[in-house]
Amino acid sequence: MKYRNVSACAGMSFLAVALAACSGGEGGGSDEAPKIEPFLWAEKPAYCAFLPSGTKFNVADRSTWEFVFVTQPEPGDDLAAAPALMQLDGRQVRLMRNLSAPGSGPQTWVYRDEGSMLEIELKLESPAIEMGGSTGGPQNATLRVRGPVRGKVQEVRGGCGL
Protein backbone atom coordinates (compact mmCIF):
# COMPACT_ATOMS: atom_id res chain seq x y z
CA MET A 1 0.00 0.00 0.00
CA LYS A 2 2.83 2.40 0.87
CA TYR A 3 4.45 1.74 -2.53
CA ARG A 4 1.20 2.66 -4.37
CA ASN A 5 0.92 5.97 -2.46
CA VAL A 6 4.54 6.87 -3.20
CA SER A 7 4.06 5.88 -6.85
CA ALA A 8 0.86 7.93 -7.13
CA CYS A 9 2.53 10.98 -5.56
CA ALA A 10 5.52 10.69 -7.89
CA GLY A 11 3.19 10.41 -10.88
CA MET A 12 1.20 13.48 -9.82
CA SER A 13 4.39 15.44 -9.24
CA PHE A 14 5.65 14.55 -12.72
CA LEU A 15 2.30 15.57 -14.23
CA ALA A 16 2.35 18.92 -12.36
CA VAL A 17 5.86 19.68 -13.65
CA ALA A 18 4.87 18.73 -17.21
CA LEU A 19 1.75 20.92 -17.08
CA ALA A 20 3.73 23.86 -15.73
CA ALA A 21 6.25 23.53 -18.55
CA CYS A 22 3.50 23.43 -21.17
CA SER A 23 1.55 26.32 -19.71
CA GLY A 24 4.40 28.81 -20.14
CA GLY A 25 5.16 29.30 -16.45
CA GLU A 26 7.65 31.91 -15.28
CA GLY A 27 10.65 30.29 -16.97
CA GLY A 28 8.84 28.79 -19.96
CA GLY A 29 7.42 30.28 -23.06
CA SER A 30 6.47 29.40 -26.57
CA ASP A 31 8.68 29.62 -29.64
CA GLU A 32 5.50 30.75 -31.44
CA ALA A 33 5.49 34.11 -29.62
CA PRO A 34 6.81 37.16 -31.49
CA LYS A 35 10.60 37.45 -31.13
CA ILE A 36 11.96 40.46 -29.25
CA GLU A 37 14.80 41.93 -31.32
CA PRO A 38 17.34 44.68 -30.62
CA PHE A 39 17.11 47.85 -32.70
CA LEU A 40 19.36 50.86 -33.08
CA TRP A 41 18.05 53.87 -31.12
CA ALA A 42 20.67 56.60 -31.28
CA GLU A 43 19.13 59.72 -32.82
CA LYS A 44 16.20 60.46 -30.49
CA PRO A 45 16.12 60.81 -26.69
CA ALA A 46 14.54 58.05 -24.60
CA TYR A 47 13.36 58.23 -21.01
CA CYS A 48 13.53 54.47 -20.36
CA ALA A 49 16.00 52.31 -22.26
CA PHE A 50 16.78 48.60 -21.85
CA LEU A 51 19.36 46.47 -23.68
CA PRO A 52 19.76 42.68 -23.68
CA SER A 53 21.86 41.66 -20.66
CA GLY A 54 25.50 41.17 -21.55
CA THR A 55 25.33 43.59 -24.49
CA LYS A 56 28.42 45.75 -24.86
CA PHE A 57 27.30 49.37 -24.52
CA ASN A 58 29.59 52.34 -24.99
CA VAL A 59 27.98 55.75 -24.46
CA ALA A 60 30.54 57.30 -26.85
CA ASP A 61 29.82 54.78 -29.65
CA ARG A 62 26.26 55.15 -30.93
CA SER A 63 26.57 51.97 -32.98
CA THR A 64 26.31 50.07 -29.66
CA TRP A 65 22.96 51.65 -28.78
CA GLU A 66 20.90 48.59 -29.70
CA PHE A 67 17.96 48.52 -27.32
CA VAL A 68 15.02 46.14 -26.97
CA PHE A 69 12.72 48.58 -25.14
CA VAL A 70 12.58 52.39 -25.05
CA THR A 71 9.98 54.93 -23.96
CA GLN A 72 9.48 58.38 -25.40
CA PRO A 73 7.36 60.73 -23.28
CA GLU A 74 5.73 63.70 -24.95
CA PRO A 75 6.38 67.09 -23.32
CA GLY A 76 3.85 67.71 -20.54
CA ASP A 77 2.55 64.10 -20.51
CA ASP A 78 2.58 61.85 -17.46
CA LEU A 79 5.60 59.52 -17.62
CA ALA A 80 3.38 56.45 -17.17
CA ALA A 81 1.51 57.46 -20.33
CA ALA A 82 4.68 57.52 -22.46
CA PRO A 83 4.57 55.16 -25.44
CA ALA A 84 7.12 52.35 -25.56
CA LEU A 85 8.86 51.19 -28.72
CA MET A 86 10.09 47.68 -29.42
CA GLN A 87 11.01 45.58 -32.42
CA LEU A 88 9.16 42.27 -32.75
CA ASP A 89 9.71 39.88 -35.65
CA GLY A 90 11.37 42.60 -37.72
CA ARG A 91 8.78 45.33 -37.26
CA GLN A 92 8.79 48.24 -34.87
CA VAL A 93 5.71 48.43 -32.64
CA ARG A 94 4.39 51.27 -30.51
CA LEU A 95 2.89 50.19 -27.19
CA MET A 96 0.92 51.96 -24.48
CA ARG A 97 1.13 51.23 -20.76
CA ASN A 98 -1.84 49.33 -19.33
CA LEU A 99 -1.98 50.33 -15.65
CA SER A 100 -5.06 48.17 -15.01
CA ALA A 101 -3.63 44.92 -16.45
CA PRO A 102 -3.53 41.95 -14.05
CA GLY A 103 -0.21 41.93 -12.20
CA SER A 104 0.67 45.50 -13.24
CA GLY A 105 2.35 47.69 -10.62
CA PRO A 106 5.48 49.70 -9.74
CA GLN A 107 7.71 46.66 -10.40
CA THR A 108 5.77 45.02 -13.26
CA TRP A 109 4.92 47.22 -16.23
CA VAL A 110 2.46 45.91 -18.82
CA TYR A 111 2.17 47.42 -22.30
CA ARG A 112 -0.37 46.75 -25.08
CA ASP A 113 -0.46 47.36 -28.77
CA GLU A 114 -3.74 49.13 -29.48
CA GLY A 115 -5.80 47.22 -32.00
CA SER A 116 -4.18 43.83 -31.36
CA MET A 117 -3.80 41.24 -28.62
CA LEU A 118 -0.06 41.96 -28.26
CA GLU A 119 0.89 42.44 -24.60
CA ILE A 120 4.41 42.97 -23.23
CA GLU A 121 5.65 42.67 -19.65
CA LEU A 122 8.70 44.47 -18.26
CA LYS A 123 9.49 43.23 -14.76
CA LEU A 124 11.99 45.41 -12.88
CA GLU A 125 14.42 44.08 -10.29
CA SER A 126 13.38 46.92 -7.96
CA PRO A 127 10.14 48.91 -8.15
CA ALA A 128 10.22 52.33 -9.79
CA ILE A 129 10.16 55.22 -7.33
CA GLU A 130 6.90 56.49 -8.87
CA MET A 131 4.55 55.11 -11.51
CA GLY A 132 6.47 55.53 -14.76
CA GLY A 133 9.18 57.53 -13.02
CA SER A 134 12.88 57.01 -12.42
CA THR A 135 14.09 53.51 -11.65
CA GLY A 136 16.71 54.94 -9.31
CA GLY A 137 19.64 53.86 -11.48
CA PRO A 138 20.48 51.05 -13.88
CA GLN A 139 19.05 47.70 -12.94
CA ASN A 140 18.34 44.21 -14.19
CA ALA A 141 14.89 43.36 -15.47
CA THR A 142 13.09 40.78 -17.57
CA LEU A 143 11.12 41.38 -20.73
CA ARG A 144 8.63 39.01 -22.31
CA VAL A 145 5.67 38.83 -24.63
CA ARG A 146 2.59 38.04 -22.49
CA GLY A 147 0.06 37.69 -25.27
CA PRO A 148 -1.41 36.56 -27.49
CA VAL A 149 1.15 33.78 -26.95
CA ARG A 150 3.40 33.83 -23.88
CA GLY A 151 7.02 34.21 -24.95
CA LYS A 152 10.27 33.28 -23.26
CA VAL A 153 11.76 35.58 -20.65
CA GLN A 154 14.62 37.76 -21.88
CA GLU A 155 17.09 39.21 -19.38
CA VAL A 156 17.63 42.95 -19.93
CA ARG A 157 19.50 45.80 -18.25
CA GLY A 158 18.74 49.50 -18.24
CA GLY A 159 16.61 52.05 -16.51
CA CYS A 160 14.53 55.19 -16.66
CA GLY A 161 15.46 58.79 -16.01
CA LEU A 162 19.18 58.08 -15.84
Image: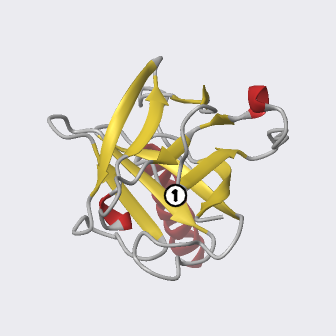
Quadrant containing the C terminus is bottom right
Who's the residue at 66% across and 50% down the image? 156
56 to 53, vertically: above or below? above
Who's the residue at 54% across and 55% down the image? 48
- Element under label 1? loop
Nearer-the-camera pick, 78 or 25: 78
Which quadrant of the structure image shows residue 138? bottom right
Residue 113 locus on image (x, y percent): 26, 40
Density class for disc 1 (Cα within 10 Å; few <14, some 14-19, many ≥20) is few
Read off the residue under disc 1: 26
Which amino acid type is marked by label 1? Answer: Glu
Q: Can you name the residue that lies furthest to the front here? A: 75
Residue 67 locus on image (x, y percent): 62, 38
Who's the residue at 31% across and 67% down the image? 78
Q: How does the figure colour the protein chain or chains? A: secondary structure
Horizontal side of residue 151 vs 61, given as left or right = left
Q: Can you name the residue that lies furthest to the top here? A: 90
Nearer-the-camera pick, 27 or 12: 27
Q: Can you name the residue that lies furthest to the left here? A: 115
Nearer-the-camera pick, 148 or 6: 148
Which quadrant of the structure image shows residue 14? bottom right
Horizontal side of residue 153 vs 74, given as left or right = right
Q: For the image shown, how many numbered marks are present on the structure?
A: 1
53 to 66, vertically: above or below? below
Residue 94 locus on image (x, y percent): 33, 37
Residue 2 locus on image (x, y percent): 57, 78
91 to 106, vertically: above or below? above
Horizontal side of residue 104 vs 123, given as left or right = left
Nearer-the-camera pick, 85 or 15: 85
Horizontal side of residue 39 vs 151, given as left or right = right
